[in-house]
Image: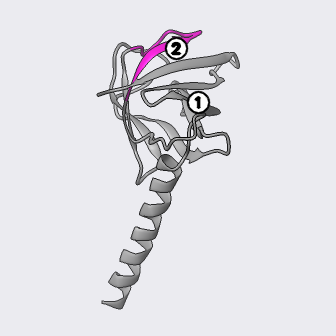
Amino acid sequence: MKFIKILALVFIGFSFTGCDAIQKATNSTGSAFSLTGKWTLNSNTPENVLVGSVVTVTPLLSEGRLSTMTGSGNCFRQSDVVWKSIASDNAGGFTISNLVSGCSGLNFQPASIYVMNANEIRVTGKNASGQELTQVWQRVK
C-alpha cells in the first residue's frame, strides 16, 4: 500500500513537470502561451513534405505525436513522435528534438519553436541533409 502511494506521488510530480514545460512559456508580448493541443503543418521548407499533417502535443509526455498524416516523405509513419523533449526556453519559445527522418532509424535534430501568436508557431532547425529547415504550424481550432 505504501509503495502505491509513493508511486502515485512520483507520477503526479512528473505530470506537473511536463505541464510546466509546455504551458508556462510566454511569447514576445509577455502573455502566457500553451503548446498543448493540435497543430497543422502549413509549410515546410526546403522539403515541402507532410504539409497538412497534424501533430498533437501532450503535456504529460512533453512530446508531439503525428496524429494525422497527409502524404508521405522522410519515412514518417502515423503516430510517430516528431517532437520530443519539449522544454520552454528563456526567450518565450521552446526547444525540441525534431524528427527529420525515419528512413534508417529515427533521426532527431535539435530545433527551436518560436511563438508567432496564439495560433501560429515556427519550427527552425536543420533537416536530415543539414540544410536550414523552417516549418509553419497553425493551431487546429
Residue name at image x 41 percent, y 14 percent: 51
Q: Which residue is mark 1?
A: 114
- The x, y position of residue 65, in whole percent, is 40, 37
Q: Is residue 20 above or below residue 68?
A: below
The front one of 134 and 33 is: 33
The quarter in which the N terminus is drawn is bottom left
Residue name at image x 56 percent, y 42 percent: 26
Residue 132 is marked as none
Q: How is the image coloured?
A: one colour
Q: Is residue 88 above or below residue 51?
A: below
Quarter of the view holding residue 27: top right
Quarter of the view holding residue 34: top left
- The x, y position of residue 125, in whole percent, is 65, 26
- Magenta-colored stretch includes residue 42: yes
Q: Quick one: label 1 or label 2, which is nearer the N terminus? A: 2
Side of 3 relative to 27 (left or right)? left
Side of 49 relative to 91 (left or right)? left
Specify the segment rendered in magenta: 39-51
The front one of 25 and 63 is: 25
The front one of 20 and 85 is: 20
Q: Residues within 10 Å of mark 1 (few under 14, many from 20)?
A: many
Q: Is residue 41 above or below residue 23?
A: above
- The x, y position of residue 3, in whole percent, is 37, 86
Residue name at image x 67 percent, y 39 percent: 91
User: Residue flagged by tag 1: what amino acid is it?
Assistant: Tyr
Q: Residues within 10 Å of mark 2 (few under 14, many from 20)?
A: some
The quarter in which the C terminus is drawn is top left
Q: Which residue is mark 2?
A: 44
